[in-house]
Every structure is written in structure tokens, then in C-alpha cells.
Image: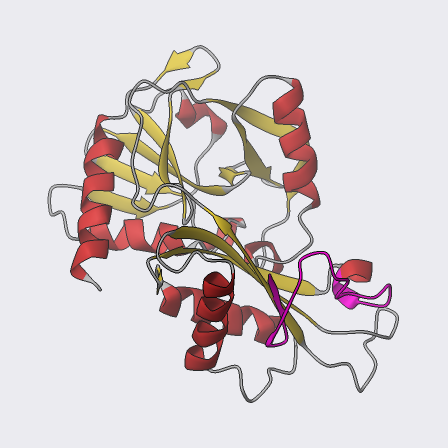
Amino acid sequence: MVNFNGNLVDVSDPILTQENRGYKYGDALFETLKVVNGKIFFWEDHYFRLMASMRILRMDIPMNFTMEFLETEILKTVEANQLIDSSARVRFNVDRGNGGKYLPNENSRVNFNIVAEPKHDPFYSINSDAIYTVDLYKDFFMAPGLLSGLKSNNKAIQVIGSIYAQENDFDNCLILNTKKNVIEALNGNLFLVKGDKIKTPPLEDGCLKGVMRKQVLQILSKDVNLFVEETSISPFELQKADELFITNVIKGIVPITKYRKKIYGSEFAQKLVIKLNTKLRLNP
């Protein structure tokens, strides 16, 4: 079942028209959520990121878009798909409705739709034997700015980058900005470990304002033995790192084990994922 503006409809029923602005112009935003046993992980962070993004895109936020209302609609969708007592991946999508060209019609109304699907790993884990290979994606570059940090439906670089990765037998690729700094992976934020120093690209470089990125930074900030810095990362630094890992809400922490000829360990990432799961258990 799909939730369209609060109504549960069959997944095979059409809910979007050809005039939908999200379809025509990518005039839409989304949040990818992990829901376990009726709990939305990091819901407050997702909610406020969505509201801030809607303001940046100058969407008229409906009065009923409160945190409580949207949470209820998400859980209603999860329950309708018989996933309330298990683990689910949820996509919450908002668009500006129908009509207009680039300029929306004055009567365009914000829509939302929610889709839930099974996700069989309730807590985060790392397979220490897994091989995860990445390379740089250099066909196109991300321009730094407010828009590059939004989870909008305009994900052309991520789409063609994913095709490039598949064609070349990579598990993922790292994206560069127009200054040729590494800013993120195709599907998550990037962290670099070198001794007691941890780096992640700053938002100003054009990376996504990731919810899991925020959680990891909060955990790292409590360790007085680490020096954590949000700073630009050049491609040259990647092969000098002890570890590289990717973060996102669905998978948590994904260690990179190979970049070009460099092989990386995952000891730091494995310790970090334990702290992440502990944080989730302590915050019911």
C-alpha cells in the first residue's frame, strides 16, 4: 500500500499525473527513513531537514505538516504494509503538485506520498569479510551551494554514477565538486581516518547534509582522543588514509576496503558501529 496525501491506495493504482511537477521538473524532495518495530530512527533530524529544504525551495508548507502528523502517516503506511513489527525502508516524498511551467501555478498544492518496503537488518552491522571497492567518478562534478545539499529528486549525477560503477565492477563511486575535492559517495557521506584524525567534507563543499553524518559526528565529538575536522578532502589524501567509510541512514556505516591499489582495514568503523547501535538503544 502507498500513502498519497493521507489516503492508502494500492501500489498499482496511479497517483501522479503527467502534470506532476516532481515528475516534470524534479520539483520534489524526499527523505529515506529506517523504521524498526514502529520507531523511526532519527525522526526529528529527518523532519527538520525536510522542513528546511522545503523552505529553500520556497514550497508552501501545509499547516498540517507537523512532526506528529507526518510521523503518524509514516507509521500508518508501515502498518498497512505489515511491517510495524519488523524493519522497513521508507521513502517520504513531497512535491509541489500539478501545473505551471518552470513557474508553478498559484494554486499548486504540495503533495506527499509514502512507500514502505521490507529491510531485514534492524540494527547496523559490518561484515568484516566483505570487499567494497570504490573509485572516483569524474565525468561530472557537483557545484557547491545550498541546492547541492538537498535531497531533491534531481539526482542525475547519482544515477549515471551508479551506472558507471556497475559497468566497471565498483560497489560505489566518490563524487568530486567543481574544485576537484572529494565530497561524498553516490549514496552517502564520506569519512576519512588517519591515525587519531577524522575528516569529513564540510557542507560548504557541496555534500549532502546527511542525517547519519550528523549522528556520527556527535558520537566522534565525545571521544577526547580524536581530532575531528570538517574540511576539504583532496583525492591525493584517499590513498594515505588508514580507513575510509561511507555513512547513510539505511546501511549505517559501510567501510571502503579498496580504492585503486590501496587496501583499507575497518577496525575503527567496527568500533564506531557498536557506539551507534548503543546510542539507538539508549534513545527509545
Q: How is the image coloured?
A: secondary structure
Residue at 68%, 77% in the rendered image: 110
Is 6 or 203 nearer to us in this picture?
A: 6
Examine the rendering and report whether any part of residue 75 can be seen: yes
Is 209 or 6 nearer to us in this picture?
A: 6
Residue at 67%, 20% in the rendered image: 167
Q: Is residue 84 above or below residue 184?
A: below
For residue 244, side relative to residue 32 (left or right)? left
Is 211 or 95 nearer to us in this picture?
A: 95
The image quarter containing residue 211 is bottom left
| Residue 266, horizontal then vertical, whole percent | 27, 25
| Residue 169, horizontal then vertical, whole percent | 58, 17
> Magenta span covers which residues?
1-22
The image quarter containing residue 256 is top left
In the rendered image, the residue lying farthest to the bottom is: 63
For residue 243, side relative to residue 155 (left or right)? left
